[in-house]
Each structure stands twice: as C-alpha cells, then as structure tokens.
Image: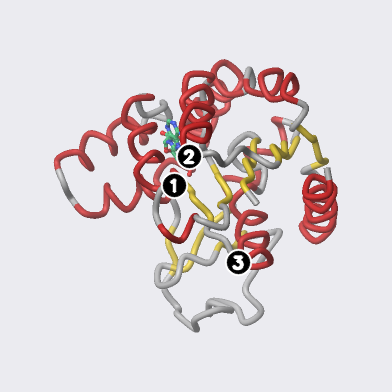
Amino acid sequence: MRLILLGPPGAGKGTQADLVAAQYNIPKLSTGDMLRAEVASGSSLGKELQAVMSSGALVSDDIMIALIRARIVREDCAKGFILDGFPRTVGQAQALDEMLTDIGCPLNAVIELAVQDDALVARISGRYACAQCGAGYHDRFKKPVTDGVCDLCGSTQFSRRADDSVETVTKRLTNYHAQTAPLLPYYQRTGLLKSLDGMAPIHEVTAQLLSALKAAEAA
Ligand code: AMP
C-alpha cells in the first residue's frame, strides 16, 4: 500500500497515519517528524530548518525531495508506506511521481482529510505529544487515560511543538491554501483522490479510511 494523506495542519493526518501504518505493517513517513529530528540533532542544516519551520513557511522543494528520495528506497518501504506531510507543493508531487515511476511502484491512493479552517486552530493549539515515545494527545479531544501519564510508554514528560502557536498556525494555514490545496485537483485528475470528512470522530475517520483503502486495493 502506497498512500498519501493530504489535508491542512491539524486535520488528523498523523493520528490516522499511525493507525493505518499499524494495520498494514508499513512505515509512516512524516516529513515534519524527519525535519524535527534534524532540528533536534543540532546540525547546521537543523538550525536553518528551525528558522523556516518556526516562521510557518515551507522548507524548499529541493531539500524535501532529496529527503523523501533517500527514504522511500529503504528496505522497510518495500511493501509500501504512508506519506504524512509530503507532497506539499505541486513540484514535490511531480518529483514523487517520477521517483515512483523509476522504481516501478505507483501510488495506490491519495486520501484528503477535509476540515474547516476555524476548527483547525483549536485542534492544533491543544495538541501535545509524549516526550519519550512521541504518542500524540490533545487537551480536549484525546487525553491520556491516566492524567499526565503516557498511555503507550508510561512517561510523564510531554512536549508541545514550537510551531503550534496561534500566529504560526495561521501562517501555516495560509500556506496550505496557497501551496498545498492545488494538489487536490492534481490528484483528482489521476483518479486516485478520495475526500473524507476529517471533522468526524477519530474512530469514524479511521473506519472510512480503511474501507477506502480496501476499495483502492481491489481497484
Ligand atoms: P508538519 O509536522 O507536517 O505540520 O510539518 C511541520 C513543518 O515542517 C511545516 O510547517 C514545514 O515548515 C515543514 N515541512 C514538513 N513537510 C514539508 C514539506 N513536504 N515541504 C515543505 N516543508 C515541510
């Protein structure tokens, strides 16, 4: 299964990608996570990335395409992968098409999680993650079972993303509409795009997503 999850920041791509990755036993390739790992490494590239990301802008296509090109040829992607946060521009989508044609592995599905803008700021500004294992939580929509303790690893340390502030989110949404939303007609033309209601509860979105993937596999 080679899948792209599209949608604005806060649409739930990361949460759904984790669930599909577990179901299909394939890796989630989150470019945001890869970039944050580079920032955390303290490298000089990481410092440059941090400046771009904290302003809410997009990292250059050249860097992103090279990152994904190196990642999808790795052994663990042989059975497929889920792209979360890539592509984000038409240039990235075209480069991805070329890469997949080169390795003879076309995409199976592109799923959009559609969410209204006004819901996104509330969603994003309430989210946080376990500092130990990265499991995602939300102040209102997804609290740990035991307050202050990660459900998955038991850690009591949590962190919030620096670019989840209201100002940066607003900038990221503006960028989404200008640079990433044009991917919807791009993938519509390929016949691979399916849009789901990302406002539905998490488990309903997952159920719809898994049934869309079954249909894509049977096609
Ligand atoms: P995300 O975790 O997907 O919301 O990404 C966080 C930030 O990383 C974005 O706001 C961008 O600055 C950067 N980023 C992640 N993926 C991409 C991409 N495919 N193209 C350009 N910038 C990206």
Q: Mark 2 or mark 1: which is in front?
A: 2
Mark 1 sits on what residue?
72
Q: CA distance from mark 2 to mark 3?
A: 21 Å
Amino acid carrying label 1: it is Ile
* Crowd tier of the residue under label 2, counting other residues whose Cα lies within 10 Å: few below 14, some 14–19, many 20 or above: few
Q: Is residue 58 above or below residue 159?
A: above
Would residue 138 be found to the left or right of residue 92 on screen? right
Q: Position of residue 140 (x, y in %)?
A: 69, 59
Would residue 115 be found to the left or right of residue 15 on screen? right
Does the residue tagged 1 have its C-beta within 8 Å of any atom of ligand 1? no
Q: Are marks 2 and 3 in contact (CB under 8 Å)?
A: no
Would residue 211 be found to the left or right of residue 202 on screen? right
Q: Quadrant of ligand 1?
A: top left
Q: Position of residue 35 (x, y in %)?
A: 35, 44
Q: Secondary structure at mark 2?
A: loop
Q: Secondary structure at mark 1?
A: helix
Give the quadrant of the C terminus.
Answer: top right
Instruction: Give the residue at x 57% y 25%.
Output: 176
Amino acid carrying label 2: it is Ile
Amino acid carrying label 3: it is Asn
Mark 3 sits on what residue?
25
Instruction: State how the image is colored.
Output: secondary structure
Residue nearest the viewer, comparing 216 with 206: 216
Q: Are marks 2 and 1 in contact (CB under 8 Å)?
A: yes
Q: CA distance from mark 1 to mark 3?
A: 15 Å
Q: Is residue 33 above or below residue 20?
A: above
Mark 2 sits on what residue?
103
User: Which one is earlier in the sequence, the residue at label 1 or at label 3?
Assistant: 3
* Crowd tier of the residue under label 3, counting other residues whose Cα lies within 10 Å: few below 14, some 14–19, many 20 or above: some
Q: Residue furthest left?
A: 44
Tag on residue 16?
Answer: none
